[in-house]
Image (cartoon, grey):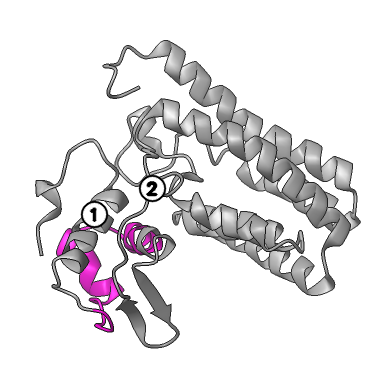
Amino acid sequence: MEAVNTIERGTSLAAKISAALRRDLAEGVFRPGDRLPSESALTREYSVSRTVVREAIAILRADGLVEARKGAGIFALETQPEKNQPFKDLKTERISSVIELLELRTVFEVESAGLAAARRSPAQIETILEAHHRVGECLATGNPTRDADFELHLAIAEATQNRRFPEFLQLIRTGIIPRGELQGSAPGSRPKDYNLHLQEEHGQIVEAIIEGNAEAARERMRAHLRGSLDRYNALLRSRTMTPEAI
């Protein structure tokens, strides 16, 4: 396998690892049906966290290159000719790309929250609460919240009873949670101020969904996403960057 540091600079760690694995799949290092290295093996090989490895695998899964088999691992699928897929050019290390995605999410997830409040089942309320509690546990223990955060938003999308909502969220998964690198933090970290009010904002959204208050759910989701959008617009205005970085 080709080392991560030979891949283009300027991309996220997850994108670098997924690109390396994608190349291995294209070149036949892993053939259809082959089992990819385990999560722990990949973390050792690339010297990254499990969260980064999971995100890299999620990118490959979204592109239909691998599949997860419960209790067995990740397996290579038949390689299809690459198509001009939506969001293929999304680069989450660019502030402008993050802003584009946040603007789209504000439209999409605001309505997702409203529909979830109107349509959620008791079982889906449980799933949403469990995901919300996992985010809180991550915050309390100082562990990364990226996966738990995504799972909460996904649980809300699934509660819309419209399968296209979670499908779309999976499609844009790689860029859905803001990255700390854009604020000068270490790779894989979250923005310095992102988690400050995260649990409180999530709690307000969850409460509105449980109460079946669609309008409140929309407003609280809008406020949650608007905060991130405002931060990145301010960051874009304040930084002196090369065109490639913006």
Q: Quadrant of the C terminus?
A: top left
Q: Tell me, for residue 190, which label it has, or none.
A: none
In percent of the image, x 37 and y 14: which residue is there? 239
User: Is any part of residue 190 visible from this angle?
Assistant: yes
Q: Which residues are magenta?
A: 32-58
Asked if residue 197 shows in the view, the reply is no
In the figure, residue 69 lies in which quadrant?
bottom left
Q: Nearer the viewer, residue 226 or 202?
A: 226
Q: Position of residue 205 (x, y in %)?
A: 76, 47
Left or right placement of residue 85 versus residue 196 in this view: left
Give the prevailing secondary structure in the magenta stretch: helix
Asked if residue 222 lies in the magenta stretch, the reply is: no
Residue located 26% across and 79% down the image: 32
Percent x, y of residue 154: 62, 59
Q: CA distance from mark 1 to mark 2?
A: 17 Å
> Looking at the picture, which amino acid does disc 1 mark?
Ala
Q: Examine the rendered structure and indicate whether residue 18 appears above or below residue 11.
A: below
Label 1 residue SS:
helix
Q: Amino acid at mark 2?
A: Asn
Q: Which residue is mark 2?
A: 84
Q: Residues within 10 Å of mark 2 (few under 14, many from 20)?
A: few
Q: Which residue is mark 1?
A: 19
Name which residue lies at 34% across and 47% down. 188
List x then y, in percent, for residue 183.
38, 28
Res 162 → quadrant: bottom right
| Circle 1 residues within 10 Å: few <14, some 14–19, many ≥20 | some
Figure check: 238 above or below 25 = above
Q: Earlier in the sequence, mark 1 or mark 2?
A: 1
Q: How many marks?
A: 2
